[in-house]
Amino acid sequence: MLPVLNMNVLNCLISFNPDISRIECLILEKKLNILLIDDEAPLRKLLARLIGLEGFIVEEAGTLKSGLSVLQHKAIDIVLCDVKLPDGSGVDFVKQVRHEFPALECILLTAYGNIADGVQSIKNGAFDYITKGNDNDRIIPLLHQAANKINAEKKAAIRIKKNGGYQFEDIIGNSPLIKNAINLARRIAATDNSVLLLGETGTGKEVFAGAIHAAGKRAEQAFIAINCSAFTRDLLEGELFGYKAGAYTGASREKKGLIQLADKGTLFLDEIGEMNIELQAKLLRVLENGEFIRLGDEKATKVDIRIIAATNRDLEAEIENGRFRADLYYRINGFTICLPPLRERSEDIAALASHFLAKYALKEGGALFRLHPDSLQLLKQNQWKGNIRELKNVLERAAILADDTAILPAQLPYDIQQQDNSLSRGLSLAEVEKMHIRKVLEHTKGNKTKTAELLGIGLTTLYRKMEEYHI
């Protein structure tokens, strides 16, 4: 169940427990918004009433077109959508919604469940895919699971640290590309210039931002990081600029925004390319004049902050498409640093692997794992679409599966193993995949949710593969 607290209780919590963070308090007071899309009006009304009794705020739509209109005008957290609708398929709708509104979650409902639709739904970004009638008792628990995920992501998307939390010494690697990026970052750190960090997801943009802050003249002030892609437009505006009590329904107390909290320090805007263009205009005013106006306020508040922004998008292309302001781009692009993808600095993989395995051993209190030379060679050959973050996850999963302190090729994901045919000579890809799934299922003692998590696939995909391979 989601906690629903009145403001007197919430204020008491804040007074007696100062460790409750500002973002946690915001989440406690905010009821999540559900958009229910179904063309069967009686069923929709019934579901809306049941969901409303759980403490959610429910919006309704009978078609995909009207549902999209609701999404464009209201801050929605979770979409609960029928698969077959008069104007299209909910499976395809999920892909569109997740692209345009990446902060929300989608759950699909169908009267005619089939494996193909279920698999495609998960690939398109659905939180889950359930059958009407058979899975009715799962709807409310699933909504709460999705809500818990959203709330956890919102809390994780804001980090407030005194010194940035990172030093340049924390950046691992001696390849020419990473050394060049570090040298550039060290040079710009001593100035007050805005910095734009460009790079794929998982290349370490926040680590660089924190190190730049810690090496600069604002090091003793706050370093505040926010992932812009984790919030809807309305919530991001409230987070950044704050609001006065009574600014909107439910705003029963005054709230300082992150821009104000970062005064004299550094504000790191991760995934700035996801920011709504109307918010971009408000941010531009901060950069130009050093002032902003909170929601519900009439007077401007002055601030002195350094901006470090990051994105994995091509902002110049976004400008051409009308999704990013050119004037804001030139303001944040005071100095650009491009962070190399891991596939272009494969000589750093050994050092990174040793670092992550040492951290895993420290966290779990177990033996220190090492990479077998064949495993290291496979890791160097991989393309690493998720970069350093993906490498960390692969190594932790391999350590869980390892029978000894050496991580062998057989403990790596099967797609990485397949880069060397000699490791699976005589076996088809399906046979290797089947063996790998069996081993992970044995490790988790048959826990399919944990197995899917370790394999890095959706639960629906795991069930389909188990059926396909007769596991």
Image (cartoon, rainbow, N blue to C red):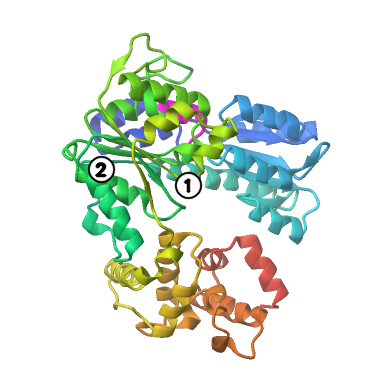
Q: Which residue extends farthest top? A: 298
Q: Looking at the magenta stretch, what is its main secondary structure?
A: helix
Which element is circle 2 on?
Answer: helix
Residue 19, relative to residue 71: is it above or below?
A: below
Q: Which residue carries the number 1 mark? A: 312
Residue 426, relative to residue 393: is it above or below?
A: below
Quadrant location, the C terminus: bottom right
Left or right of 62: which side holds 13? left
Left or right of 148: which side holds 289? left
**Residue 3 highlighted magenta (yes or no):** no
Can residue 339 be seen at all in this image of the molecule?
A: yes
**Residue 236 highlighted magenta (yes or no):** yes
Which element is circle 1 on?
Answer: loop
Q: Amino acid at mark 1?
A: Asn
Tell me how far mark 1 sits from mark 2, CA to CA.
Answer: 21 Å
Left or right of 159: which side holds 409? right
* x then y, percent, for residue 216: 19, 41
Quadrant of the rendered image containing residue 343: bottom left
* x then y, percent, for residue 423: 54, 87
Q: Which residue carries the number 2 mark? A: 188
Q: Residues within 10 Å of mark 1 (few under 14, many from 20)?
A: some
* x then y, percent, for residue 144: 54, 44
Q: Amino acid at mark 2?
A: Ile
Asked whether 284 or 43 is in front, the reply is 284
